[in-house]
Amino acid sequence: MRVSVVVFPGTNCDRDTKWAFEEIGANVEFIWHNENDLKNPDLVVLPGGFSYGDYLRSGSIARFSPVMKKVVEFANKGGYVLGICNGFQVLLESHLLPGAMKRNENLHFVSKHHHLKVVNNDNKFLRNLEVGEIVNIPIAHAEGNYTPQSEEALKKLWDNGQILLQYVDENGHISNPNGSADSIAGICNENKNVFGLMPHPERAMQSILGSKDGVRMLTSFLDK
């Protein structure tokens, strides 16, 4: 499997992401923000960090990078795209995913392990997990308050099976660290080929790091 990891100025989770996918057997290449060639990938990943210093809004400048034209074309042709944390924010700003991110409800940066519940696994990203399963994945963000355009838009996400992950406690009860609507931690597009989540599965690859629950998330892309 070929994975292209896009690197913007300010990205700081690119090497973590490359390492994580290489650990599960993928061939990974970095794609710099001003390139116009994605190198024929099976999956494009927009990693976490602070693209362009998060000036204006998180992801709002990165969406205009030359490489994003290719990412949008790739996604619109059915190619798989994964946005992690800042990458999720870039996908929202690029309108590849619906909704927007606001500042965390408590206005503080949050960095810790947090439990997630799998809401929908009818997609390539979470098909190796069970609906209702609880996983433990690190979060690290200041603007993770996912906000849909309207109540009608939120209902549409639920009806279409686009809500993939919710923030919960270890027992599966809602535990919202940032104020996201319906405690949403991850979504996909209607065609289920573009995925975004605020938590960092690439940081949950080994038990010694606190969790290896990210392994099954990422290996889902490798399996035929």
Image: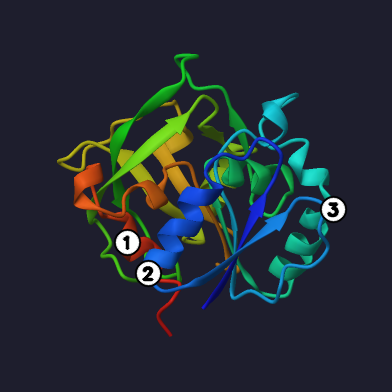
Q: Position of residue 60 (x, y in %)?
A: 75, 35
> Up-down: is 30 above or below 11?
below
Q: From the viewer's side, name the closer residue of 156 and 69.
A: 69
Residue 162 badge = none
> Up-down: is 150 above or below 177?
below
Task: Name the kind of residue labelled 2 in the image.
Answer: Ile
Name the mark nearer the viewer: 3 or 2. Answer: 2
Q: SS of the residue at dot 1?
A: helix
Graded by Cα atoms within 10 Å as few (under 14), some (14 to 19) or many (20 or more), the crowding at tag 3 reads some
Check the image and name the residue furthest to the left: 171
Q: From the viewer's side, name the closer residue of 54 and 15.
A: 15
Residue at image point 51% right, 78% down? 1
Q: Earlier in the sequence, mark 1 or mark 3?
A: 3
Name the mark nearer the viewer: 2 or 1. Answer: 2
On the question of residue 162 being in view, the answer is no
Q: Please tell me how many numbered marks the rendered image carries.
A: 3
Q: Position of residue 222 (x, y in %)?
A: 43, 76
- Asked if disc 2 and disc 1 are in contact, CB closer than 8 Å, the reply is yes
Mark 1, residue position: 215
Left or right position of 174 against 186 = left
